[in-house]
Amino acid sequence: MTDVKIRLYVEHPLGAGQRLALNKDQSHYLFAVMRQPLGARIAVFNGADGEWLAEVSKANKRNGELYLISQRGPQQNPPDLWLLFAPIKKARTDFIVEKAAEMGVSRIVPVQTDFTNADRIRQDRLQAHAVEAAEQCGGTFVPEVAELAKLPRVLSDWPEGRKLMFCDETLTGEACATDALSAAGAAPWAILIGPEGGFSDAERQALRGLPFAHPVSLGPRILRADTAAVAAMTLWQINLGDWL
Ligand code: SAH
């Protein structure tokens, strides 16, 4: 396989012999930042058609163009796993989105809980982080970052058949119930991580009453929300996902 160092996400159908017009940001990145010459080969993916080998057919810093040569890898979608998390400080929220894209979730859903401080998010910026993470980790899929939604609303609109791994900090110290997760069966699933302040008693009570929710412990120590997200995704992927 031709060795290529740059991978670029594009919103464009991919097929052999096609020409692909790059937008301003992509052209700036490829030709001003990465200084790719005419004829340079890079990889592109669009989240649906696998990974393609492309050649620079116009090296212009504002409106470059690629020529699509051939498919070099299959489309690989993550398991049907959503990550629900309460937005925290900017850098930690960015981290959670980046890690979720790397670890393999299909959708990222920021939720507003009783102890969430943020009342808005920069959805476009978070989506750009997910794209960057997919580009650098070799993935061909970019999870969608949903709009910030209130937790009760998300739970009342819950899709039938989707299970919820509810990471409940009051279970800290109890055995991590990976057997129970596996026994509950395969995807679709969602993981729920609370904010730094944890969940309110009312939220916990409501969550525990939901037939699709499976409360779990993440071990003997209280983890920060960003650490908890990574730990929960790892546990889920090992027991039910595509790391097997
Ligand atoms: N301030 C809270 C901790 C919140 S930690 C307290 O002191 O109790 C942030 C989130 O990470 C929690 O809401 C939970 O979803 C998750 N989390 C952290 N450690 C956990 C653990 N040991 N078990 C289960 N969930 C945990």
Image (cartoon, helix red, strand yellow):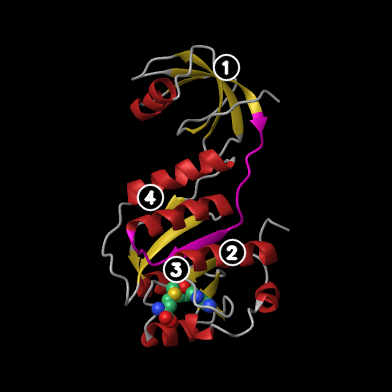
Under mark 3, the amino acid is Ala
Alpha carbon separation for disc pair 3 and 1: 46 Å
Q: Which residue is labeled 4 in the image?
A: 126
Mark 4 or 2: the one toward you: 4
Q: Which residue is labeled 1 in the image?
A: 17
* Magenta-colored span: 72-89
| Res 198 visible | no
Viewer-closest of 167 and 160: 167
Q: Residue at x 45, y 24 (%)?
A: 34
First in sequence, mark 1 or 2: give its number.
Answer: 1
Under mark 1, the amino acid is Gly
Alpha carbon separation for disc pair 4 and 1: 33 Å
Mark 4 or 1: the one toward you: 4
Spot occupied by residue 195 in the image (x, y as percentages of width and height): 39, 71
The quarter of the picture where the N terminus appears is: top right
Viewer-closest of 50 and 99: 99
